[in-house]
């Protein structure tokens, strides 16, 4: 090839990848544009790039990672995770971490002095402990019941047209029906952020408390994985480096126009307006109309489904100078309630961490609360616990050194909608108008491992096909 020919080819390739409109706005041409840089969106972008596709990933925050939150002590640099804490030991997970060069290790849980307390009044509570034998038997029985429905493992696309009646029983009624009370509080502890768990339709518990998760619990946690450095944010930092200029942080999609053969996405970035012309679009943010209406040309089919969603609210936090001793973990229980499960809104508990003088904590509400109201309630609850449990007052002011709002969390619909085929219809949206969807709502649980597994086996083949 002559030098002139090589220059022409290079110019042509550059034109394919990036063109300038007459108004001066840069237009990128990509195979796929992904909106949302959380668990599902980042995985999708990385895997598509590994498969040789050109991608653009748009994220409104200044980092990738979504629900991942890692605390790093500013002095010692010791870290721990308090958002996404562990992962399932399945091939999709291990392959993903390996491909990005992030070492994994068995998730270990520090042994601490675990105390039950009624957070409503701050008092220590003595309740009959569920024996490991009873809890294990209940988990095995639950797993046996769950294994009747293998089509629940990945997404919603394989649901039968007529659902088993147990799917729409409330979780509280299901527990009673099958005498699973020994695992009720355990499920409450594991399935955080779902609102009033005893009122939740059982199909959602099935999706969260999967067979793989049950196996991990029965193993004492030995089959769960985490990053060897106890820094799950490192996975997303490496993904950002791998994507390079194809990832747009602190950026907001302002308009999407979906045509018959391509999609045009307009993005407001820190460096100005960016237009992306893509063959296919992946949306990896919660499909609430309040999230989508500002930019997406939502059609009637999509609107009729998305308008039915409700959601719960969930926060995590790291508190310094709480007054709670370093080696103490507090569990919120209420003996006046069924299975000792406390009433929400409120805290699930506080956990001792490897960094001195800090505790992690988690808070949920079935309905909206402002961040300020949640912080005030957390501080009031901790003050109440310290007084009633006799802990000495902290040496300095109690303060938040980490605080994250994960709403909208756990999108659900009514039992009538579930019975009338809502999720079968939701699954049918994949691929329409050159648009694909991934994330917790589409897999059915806020579980990174399961979201990646769903994306790998159900979404990527459709995009690449």
Image (tube, rainbow, N blue to C red):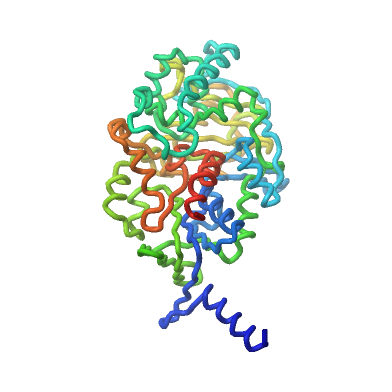
* On-image quarter of the N terminus: bottom right
| Residue 313 visible, this angle | no
Q: Is residue 391 above or below residue 274?
A: above
Residue 454 visible from this viewpoint: yes
How many callouts does the rendering have?
0
Taking depth in this image into account, of 321 and 35 the one nearest to the observer is 35
Residue for point 45% across, 17% down = 339
At which x and y percent is residue 443?
46, 40
Name above or below for residue 390 compared with residue 2: above
- Does residue 195 appear left or right of residue 324 in this picture? left
Q: Is residue 154 above or below residue 183?
A: below
Write the residue at 58% across / 66% down: 245
Q: Quadrant of residue 131?
A: top right
Rendered location of residue 122, percent (x, y)? 49, 23
Residue 104 appears left or right of 360: right
Residue 241 at x, y = what percent?
64, 60
Residue visible at 55% across and 53% down in the picture? 42
Measured as percent of width and height from the top left, residue 151 is found at: 46, 32
The image quarter containing residue 368 is top left
Instruction: From the viewer's side, name the closer residue of 416 and 91.
Output: 91
Q: In screen coordinates, is 300 left or right of 286? A: left
């Amino acid at each position: 090839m002559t030098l002139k020919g090589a220059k022409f080819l290079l110019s042509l390739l550059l034109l394919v990848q990036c063109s300038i409109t007459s108004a001066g706005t840069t237009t990128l041409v990509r195979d796929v544009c992904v909106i949302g840089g959380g668990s599902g969106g980042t995985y999708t972008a990385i895997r598509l790039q590994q498969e040789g596709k050109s991608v653009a990933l748009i994220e409104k925050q200044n980092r990738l990672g979504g629900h991942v939150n890692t605390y790093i002590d500013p002095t010692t640099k010791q870290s721990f995770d308090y958002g996404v804490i562990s992962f399932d030991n399945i091939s999709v997970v291990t392959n993903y971490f390996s491909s990005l060069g992030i070492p994994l290790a068995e998730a270990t849980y520090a042994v601490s002095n675990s105390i039950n307390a009624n957070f409503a009044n701050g008092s220590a509570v003595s309740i009959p402990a569920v024996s490991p034998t009873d809890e294990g038997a209940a988990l095995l029985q639950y797993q046996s019941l769950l294994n009747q429905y293998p089509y629940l493992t990945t997404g919603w696309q394989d649901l039968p047209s007529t659902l088993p009646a147990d799917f729409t029983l409330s979780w509280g009624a299901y527990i009673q029906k099958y005498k699973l009370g020994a695992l009720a509080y355990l499920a409450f502890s594991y399935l955080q952020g779902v609102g009033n768990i005893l009122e939740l339709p059982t199909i959602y518990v099935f999706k969260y408390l999967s067979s793989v998760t049950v196996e991990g619990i029965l193993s004492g946690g030995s089959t769960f994985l985490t990053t060897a450095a106890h820094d799950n944010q490192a996975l997303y930092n490496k993904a950002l480096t791998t994507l390079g200029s194809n990832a747009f942080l602190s950026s907001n999609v302002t308009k999407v126009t979906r045509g018959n053969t391509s999609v045009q996405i307009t993005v407001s970035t820190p460096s100005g307006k960016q237009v992306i012309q893509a063959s296919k679009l992946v949306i990896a943010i919660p499909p609430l109309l309040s999230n989508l209406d500002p930019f997406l040309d939502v059609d009637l089919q999509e609107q009729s489904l998305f308008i039915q969603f409700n959601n719960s609210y969930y926060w995590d936090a790291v508190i310094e100078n709480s007054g709670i001793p370093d080696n103490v973990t507090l569990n919120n229980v209420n003996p006046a309630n069924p299975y000792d499960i406390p009433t929400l809104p409120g805290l699930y508990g506080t956990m001792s961490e490897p960094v001195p003088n800090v505790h992690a904590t988690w808070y949920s509400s079935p309905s909206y609360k402002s961040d300020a109201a949640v912080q005030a309630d957390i501080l009031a609850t901790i003050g109440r616990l310290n007084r009633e449990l006799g802990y000495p007052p902290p040496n300095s002011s109690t303060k938040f050194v980490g605080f994250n709002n994960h709403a909208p969390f756990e999108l659900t619909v009514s039992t009538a909608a579930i019975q009338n085929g809502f999720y079968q219809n939701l699954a049918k949206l994949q691929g329409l108008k050159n648009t694909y969807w991934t994330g917790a709502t589409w897999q059915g649980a806020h579980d990174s491992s399961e979201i990646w597994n769903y994306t790998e086996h159900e979404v990527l083949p459709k995009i690449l096909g």
